Amino acid sequence: MWDNFFENFASVLTKYHMQLLSGLANTLIIAVSAFVIGIFLGTLIGVIKVVPKYNNWFLIVLDKICDVYVTIIRGTPIVVQLLLMYFGLLAQSALTRSEDGTLFIAIIVFGLNSGAYQSEYIRAALMSIDKGQLEAGRALGLSYRTSMIRIIIPQAVKNIVPTMGNELITLLKDTSVAGYITVIDVTFAVQRIVARNYLALVDYVILAVIYLVLVLLVTIILRMIEKRLHKNDNLKVMSRKRLFGSRGNGNGN
C-alpha cells in the first residue's frame, strides 16, 4: 500500500495539477461567495430579530418568516438542500445543464445555509452588547438606526470575528459535498483522478493536505485580524488615558 508512496504523490501532483487547481478554484469560489451571501443574510436576519417590534405587524411577520427559514435550514443537512434545489426546485432550469449553472446553484445553496447559521451568531453578538450603550446613544439624540450602526454593530463585529472565521472554515470543508450535483470542486476532481489512476490512498492524502493547508491559511489570517483589532482597541484605551490624564493635570494646576 505504501510502496513508492512519495514517488506516486509527486507523480499525481505533476500529472493532474491543472485538474486539482481547477477544482480548488471552484471550492474557493463557492466558499467565499457563500460566506459573503451568508454575511448579508445573517446581518439582515440578526437585526430583524433584535430590533424592537412595538406591535409593528410587518416586523412581526418578517420575524416569523426568518424563524421558519432558520429552522428549516438548520434542521436539514446541506446535502439534502443541494439535492432538493438541483433535482427538485430547479430541475427544469437551464442552470442544471451547464457547469457554470451548477456552480451557481451550489453558491446559492451554501449561501442560504450559511446565512441561517450566521444570523444566529450575529443575533447573539448584538444582544451581548450592553443595552445601556444603545440607551446612551439615544439619549445623545441619535436615532435607533444610527445608534445601531455607529455604536452597537462595530462592537459586535469585534466579538464575532472568531466565530465568523470558524464559519468560513466550515464552509470550505462542507463544499466537499458539492459533487453531489456534479460541481467539479477539488473533492470531485480527486474522485475523477482516482477513477483514472487507481491510487486512492495517494489521491486522498493529497486531498486531505489541500484542505488542511486551506484551513491553516484561514486560521492564520483570522489571528492576524484579531491581533489588529485588539491592537486598535489598546491604542484607543491609551489615547483616552492620555487625554483624561492631561485634563487632570490641567485642572490640578
Image (cartoon, helix red, strand yellow):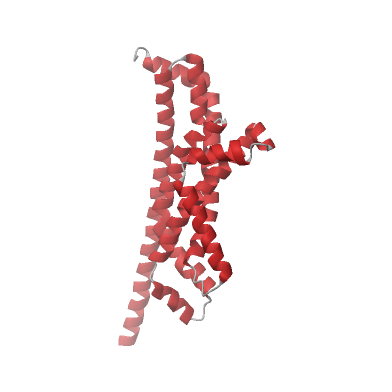
Indicate the quadrant where residue 87 lies.
Answer: top right
* In the image: residue 101, left or right of residue 161: right
**251 up-or-down from 51: above or below:** below
The front one of 108 and 1 is 108
Residue 160: x %, y % from top left = 41, 56
Considering only vertical position in the picture, is 155 above or below 104?
Answer: below
Q: In screen coordinates, is 183 left or right of 77?
A: right
Where's residue 6, x and y in %? 38, 17
Q: Residue furthest left?
A: 252
Which quadrant: the C terminus?
A: bottom left
Find residue 2 and report its image quarter.
top left
Front residue of 220/192: it is: 192
Q: How many marks?
A: 0
Q: Residue at x 54, y 30 (%)?
A: 23
Q: Is residue 43 visible?
A: no
Q: Quadrant of the N terminus?
A: top left
Tell me: residue 173, above or below residue 39: above
What residue is at 30 percent from the left and 86 percent from the top?
252
Tell me which residue sits at (54%, 55%) in the image: 41
